[in-house]
Amino acid sequence: MKGKLNTDLGQVLISPEVVAKYASETAYECFGIVGMAMVSMKDGLVRLLKRDSSTKGINVIIDEDNEITIDFHIIVSYGVNIATIADNIISNVKYKVEEFTGMSVKKVNVYVEGVRNID
């Protein structure tokens, strides 16, 4: 469902794909993120996504009250505290997406799908 904002000049519709792209770029700014992940339903393998297709690792749901729920599937850097990375993503994404869209973010879920050693 698309997000709807009513203004004096008309109605603005925001696609979940646009929110996913913006949330992806915001998450990449956070320290400790290697990238977004996609889990294959066929064989259960986790795949690191290229940056241009990283929105496949993010699921955005906009409900009828214009509240956004964002699910991230990420791969983190080895040796970094996972709870700190998740808190950083949640706070940054919530703040920036709310500023960008004008809608409230109800929930940000972070699923860590893997750990990579970065040289």
Image (cartoon, rainbow, N blue to C red):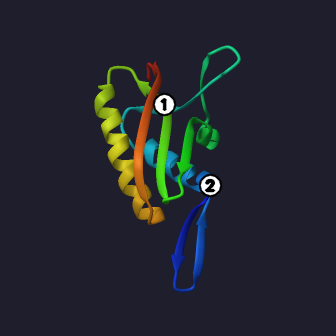
What is the number of the mark on residue 74? 1
The quarter of the displayed image where residue 89 is located: top left
Depth check, front residue: 18 or 102: 102
Under circle 1, the secondary element is: strand
Horizontal side, residue 81 vs residue 5: left or right? left
Residue 69 in the image: above or below residue 49: below
| Quarter assignment of residue 11 | bottom right
Percent coordinates x, y for residue 92 in the rendering: 35, 49
Amino acid type, label 2: Met
Up the image or down, 104 lies above or below 76; here it is: below
Residue 1: image tag: 2
**Residue 62, x across and y down, in percent:** 54, 53
- Position of residue 26 in the picture relative to residue 57 (left or right): left
Point 55% across, 46% down: residue: 60
53 to 40, vertically: above or below: below
For the N terminus, the quadrant is bottom right
**Crowd rating for badge 2 (residues with CA inside 10 Å; few <14, some 14–19, many 20+):** few
10 Å crowding of disc 1: few (<14), some (14-19), many (20+): many
